[in-house]
Image: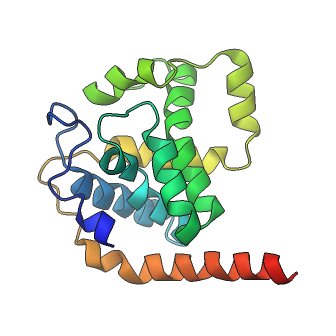
Amino acid sequence: MDRLHACRGAWDTPDRSGDPVDLHDHALQTAALLRRSHPCDKELQVAGLVHDLGHLLVPGDDAEHAGHAADAVRPLLGDRVARLVRLHVPAKRYLATVEPGRALSPQSALTLGEQGGLMGAAEVRAFEADPHAAAAVVLRQADDAGKVAGLDAGVMEDWRAVLERVAAGAFARTAARRTG
């Protein structure tokens, strides 16, 4: 929760030239969109909440921000949340490839090249073969839509219980693997 609260006033670019909302509002908007479209998938919602923490952890590293965030959240929130967070950038590349007219925010369009650009045919096939690809695309679509200045998507404390539930599930799965 401390890291999520620290996103207030933190931006995806150090000079604030990127997206029109700070990381805090973007996280809330993305998670709220996922709650609305996938109300039973708490891990997907939480992935939407934490997907851009890498911008806070390593400012200015657009190319690797998803990996930084995934590595940071995996111990607490589990493998699936971390995998979805890691895949939100490949999902952008995938969507830009298979839907060439798809609109991206100016900042997302700018960073697409730094993040690998359009996918080749082999990359598309590999992405589609990932068992988390469909959920990662849903996360990416919410990520792209969750950049509306002035939109009230609630408060971070509203997510505490969901985060705790997802963390408890991740802990239980880890404990079961160790004993099983």
Rendered position, 138 above or below 153: above
Query: At 34% across and 29% down in the image, what residue appears?
Result: 108
- Left or right side of 82 for 173: right
Q: Residue extending furthest right?
A: 180
Q: Front-most of 8 and 32?
A: 8
Residue drawn at (39%, 47%) of the image = 54
Q: Is residue 172 visible?
A: yes
What's the residue at 57%, 62% (across, down)? Answer: 74
Q: State the scheme by which the image is colored.
A: rainbow
The residue sitting at the left extreme is 150
- Above or below, 130 against 122 in this view is below
Q: Is residue 111 left or right of residue 130?
A: left
Image quadrant of residue 60?
Answer: top left
Locate residue 23, reporting x and y percent. Answer: 26, 51
User: Residue 140: x and y, percent?
Assistant: 47, 43
Q: Quadrant of the C terminus?
A: bottom right
Q: Which sits in the foreground, 143 or 36?
A: 143
